[in-house]
Image: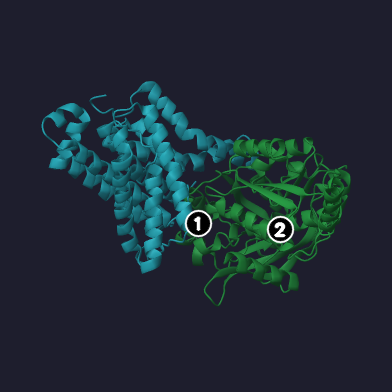
Chain colours: A green, B cyan
Amino acid sequence: MKKLVSAATLALSMSVSGLAFAEPVKIGLITTLSGGGAGLGVDTRDGFMLAIKQAGNSEIEVVTEDDGQKPELAVQIADKMIQSDQVDILTGIVWSNLLMAVAPSAVAQGKLYVSTNAAPAALAGANCNPLYFNAAYQNDNLHEAMGEYANKDYKKVFIMAPNYPAGKDSLTGFKRYYKGELASEVYTQVGQTDYAAEIAQIRASGADGVFAFLPGGMGIAFLKQYAQSGVEIPVMGPGFSFSQDVLPAIGDAALGAKASGQWAPDFDTDVSKKFLADFQAEYGRLPSIYAVQAYDAAQLILSAAAKADVKDTEAFRAELLKADIKSPRGDFKFNTNQHPIQDIYLTEVVKQADGMLTNKTVEKIFDDHGDAYAKDCKM
Amino acid sequence: MTVALALEQLLNGLQLGVMLFLMAAGLTLIFGVMGLINLAHGSLYMVGAFACATVAAATGSFWIGLVASLACAAAAGAIIELLVIRRLYDRDHLDQVLATFALILIFSEGTRWLFGSFPLYLDIPPLLQGAVALPGGAQYPVYRLAIIAAGALVAFGLYLLIGKTRLGMRIRAGESDREMIGALGVDIRTLYTVVFALGAALAGLAGAMVGALQSVQVGMGEPVLILAFVVIVIGGIGSIKGALLGALLVGVVDTMGRLLLPQLFGLFVPPSQAGMIGAAAASMLIYVMMALILAVKPRGLFPAAHM
């Protein structure tokens, strides 16, 4: 009898392992699901879970927790996920200041971190880590693209970002490519809701263009107030300032704004169209760039899990590094510092036939663009 | 710096001050009359904004939304006073802080549950769109001028209400001696509910007016709440006059600080660092001011008489 049971168990386990990964994978998804930044986190979660759901594999488990956009909370959750949930991979953090609190200690404990968004310069150069991957970009990238674009149409640009790591990366990135004169360089508070003081400075600055990196609620507040101010200087920004999670709340004030992005809903590829249709069918809204990045992060993890055992970190990260996925973004591969090499496009905010605001691709700014820090990364 | 920029920033400071006054007036009234620290005041501000955005989207009229925001915030205020706050008057401040903090969490999650995590759309009414010319060549948004005017009206209305009406007389009596006014036969419970609803309505009005300028989203009330507390501490807890002057002071100092401090640091260090240091210093400025004022006048600028 005992033999029979063990034989049956063996047969059962063999039949299962035909479909399964080398080893079950447990993922800890820490993202912002409450507070002002919740829209970004919800899109991250939904994009990630869409890929997991499509894979339809019961051997992958995702534990989701809300960090409330608070670094100290994110650290607690990460500790709990590593120690008591025993996750193999952490992912999902939207904000660079939270990522800096979580990722270095997670990789020091031998866990993989695959970033869906935050990509501070500090982790891309000399302090890169074999266990830290970024599926989104390097923080500077979209800002670099706008700097390159601004060279064409503008002579004197007013640049503005919140005072936190990604804000500094943003303006550094813009200035790396922008050759013209700067009217002024302004840092605002994180979570600031009133931009009257900054708008007055823009008006007085004599600038011919405004570059603003203001993700989430900050961008909504700024653009609505800017539209009412009577200042006619055109506003541009990285895709975050005009992404799908904020466009409906900004309204017509965003029309015509130029931005940069690695993806827009009008991409004419089968992968992108399918992703768009699946996301809309599942959640009843248009995905933002955050959803695409998280979708790709999940695809990357799934692609590696299909071929390697997650407990064998070396083999698993070698599979991750191959980036064997079909991204809605199109070309996608990893640089030597495990950040993406990808194309970056200029987009414009337009109104669809159904009255919904969205981003339309205008032209390609960068082809196969990496980042400025990869050369300092010795792995 | 030009005269036009200085004038525009002064108006911006006034507008921020007026908005803070609407929040601080309710907060300080509730503290003055009932001795209650209400951390959930920011949630009532959020309720006002969400009510206005929802009703404006359904009816197409900002003005109906504005009325709805007053009604909803007042109703929410009255309901939480009856259900929760009423049990807290006799307890110490720590219990009040704990219970009203719980209310913040309940309101936030409840709102998320009803409306989702994405910000709502609320636009400025067509009547108040656009900008007007200021002397010196600058332009200023009509809507912000309207907020300043509305705030001035509310301040005047509160002055009349508290100084000239029977309700105001009772509020003042409640501030100076709670037991005595009860002993004289005034229905103190109803008075408390009315004062609480009034404070809530003012917060809701502020939320709706500001909601059209920024994003209507969960958690929008808390940053304003912190500033409102700074205002009432500076102005003197329990004093409406203190709240008005404190609010204008905080509004103007904060706005001017954000403009001038980066320029000041720009004299000594390169512009990109000046921007960063200036922004950091500007965000501390009002707290430094609060510390200085409290060092000289520990009970604020206009301490309420009985405290």
Q: Please state the chain letter of the residue tagged with numbered disc 2 in the rendered image.
A: A
Disc number for residue A52: 2
**Residue occupying image coordinates x 76% and y 44%:** A88
Instruction: Indicate the quadrant containing the C terminus of chain B: top left, top right, bottom left or bottom right.
Output: top left
Tell me the element at label 2: helix
**Residue occupying image coordinates x 55% and y 78%:** A353
Between B220 and B146, the residue placed more toward the observer is B220
Q: Please state the chain letter of the residue tagged with numbered disc 1 in the rendered image.
A: B
Asked if residue A17 can be seen in this view, the reply is yes
Between B198 and B159, the residue placed more toward the observer is B198
Query: What is the three-letter code of the residue carrying label 2?
Result: Ile
Q: How many marks?
A: 2
Name the residue that disc number 1 marks: B116
Say left or right for A147 vs A207: right
Tell me the element at label 1: loop
Image: A237 above or below B156: below
Between A80 and A163, the residue placed more toward the observer is A80
The answer to whether the residue labelled 1 contacts the one labelled 2, judged by CB atoms less than 8 Å apart, is no
Q: Quadrant of residue B40?
A: top left
- Place of residue A249 in the rendered image (x, y in percent of width and height, measured from the top left): 50, 61
Image: B160 above or below B237: below
- Place of residue B75 in the rendered image (x, y in percent of width and height, measured from the top left): 30, 50
Asked if residue B134 can be seen in this view, the reply is no
**Residue at mark 1 to residue at mark 2: CA–CA distance:** 23 Å
Query: What is the three-letter code of the residue carrying label 1?
Result: Gly
Disc number for residue B21: none
- Place of residue A82 in the rendered image (x, y in percent of width and height, measured from the top left): 71, 38
